Amino acid sequence: MRRDPLGITLAFAMALSISPATSAQTKQPAVPPKSSRPDQAHDLSGVWFDDHPRLIRVQERYWAYTFTPEAPPLTPWAQAKFNAAKSSFGPHAVPLVETTDPLYHTCAPIGFPIAYLYPLPMQIVQTPGEVILLFEWDSLRHQIFTDGRKHDETLGPLWMGDSIGHWEGDTLVADTVNFNDKTWLDRMGHPHSDALHVIERIRRVDHDHLVDDITIEDPKAYTKLWTAHLPFVLKPKWTLAEQFCEDEESFQTIDKDAAAPAK
Amino acid sequence: MRKRPLGVALAFAMVLRFSPAASAQSKQPSKPAAPSSADQAHDLSGIWFDDRPRPVTVNARYWTYKFNAEEPPMTAWGLAQYNATKSSFGTRAYPLAETNDPVYHTCAPPGFPRVFLHPYPIEIVQTPGEVIMLFEYDSLRHQIFTDGRAHDTTLGPLWMGDSIGHWEGDTLVADTVNFNDKTWLDRIGHPHSESLHIVERIRRVDHDHLVDDITIDDPKAYTKPWSTHIEFGLRPKWTLAEQFCEDEESFQTIDKDSAMPAK
């Protein structure tokens, strides 16, 4: 398979061209402003992009490869898995040719929640019974059923998990289980098991900003629950492009572009 | 990568369970019913599934692997390409181990419009500026922009193409260009080039039925434009499952299941 350099280059040209405005808006508010209109309360729709500040060096941007600046509370089982993982990110980065990242060599589905860590936008669309996050990267879907159904225990282990949600005020609380154990939790190689349970609290803090507070529970991999905070900013003029994993060259292009300093 | 038989088996269990009803509704109406209410005119949303009858053997159902019963009008180039393909479908089917179907061995995206021929449901969601078809199979998206934009000629060759649309009465007319030439047009190996141009006329003929009249124009591969007609039935109780291509074993399971007689 050959890569599609133009598509990837374009997506990053787009991302970089908008980044000055993004950077100017990225201070995380201590007290988020309230939703400005009541009809926005349950409307998460739009194209969203990571709203962390863009530091110059990619390795200083932990959010490009893991969820929190501090190490998550690994069990001995998970510590052994993490020690065996060879990621091309973080303080223990290995060159791409040496990585054991399952994505880089097989173009396996990215999985969830690691999909949030790739520097590409996502679009939220809503139907009466669903909130659907469409990731540009790998055309992934995170479908959250809000019609009151329970988890479907008959579903096999899934790459993206099985997600149900409900509204608590203006916050969508999404609960995801039924994962397989073939993916890394993040791009740095932290593991998860098929007992992974992800709880998201997704809120549009104002018209242009969305936050996703994610709680990770996985008793096999982590000694306790831990949480991450993902900020997103609305990109009203963006649309999702096509980004399929074709081979590891795709990743080299992505990583090189993402490492370029913000202009 | 290992196969995930449970997910595949489940999807087909679902399909087979609903197939008697589907067959009962699948007679192609000679005069489609008018939309039952005015507000449906531009509402294509819902889960849709191929609504044609399910004969006993997979090879009797041309619509699971090609668009028309008769051969499309191939150019000399198109015919040479076609003769070199080894599909596992149709009258000259090869065993899976011998096929050169690009999807089977590399899990390449099947692309558009081929994805319509894979026996999985689609979900249509709409936003103010888009009609989006979400395919269960391979998590693909067919995003049709209805906000008046023109084709973006700077987009690289794409697996799913670049789609814009407008409404003509109750019909969404979608125009798709900017394809790559890495995919087969269908599952039997008819080719297309980067000049492929697809025009769809998508109409909800009544609440429970949708038709997509597709015109295929590709002067390199075909001597003239040709058309096909796909019928879908609404599946109000279905939701999209997760179906990622992982390896060719997945396809063996799929093909075995889809070759089973309808019950």
Image (spheres, grey):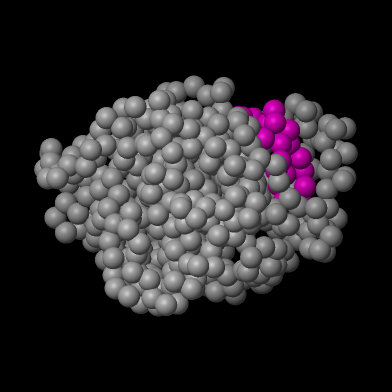
Instruction: Give above or below for A23 relative to B256.
Output: below
Q: Give the residue displayed 49% in from the left and 71% down from the top.
A: B81
Say which of B256 and B32 sits in front. Answer: B256
Q: Split into 4 quadrants, where in the image is the C terminus of chain A?
A: bottom right
How many circles with numbers are drawn on the protein? 0
Indicate the position of residue A36 as horizontal and vertical percent values.
Answer: 36, 45
Drawn side of residue A69 relative to residue A7, left or right: right
Magenta part, dominant SS: loop
Say which of B261 and B10 sits in front. Answer: B261
Drawn side of residue A15 relative to residue B36, left or right: right
Region in magenta: A173-199
Q: Split into 4 quadrants, where in the image is the N terminus of chain A?
A: bottom right
Q: Give the residue displayed 47% in from the left and 57% down from the top.
A: B188
Indicate the position of residue A188 as horizontal and vertical percent values.
Answer: 76, 50
Q: Is residue B148 visible?
A: yes
Indicate the position of residue B2 as horizontal and vertical percent values.
Answer: 70, 42
Q: Give the residue displayed 36% in from the left and 40% down from the top.
A: B49
Q: Is residue A44 visible?
A: no
Q: Give the residue displayed 16% in from the left and 59% down from the top.
A: B168
Asked if the magenta segment contains residue B105, the reply would be: no
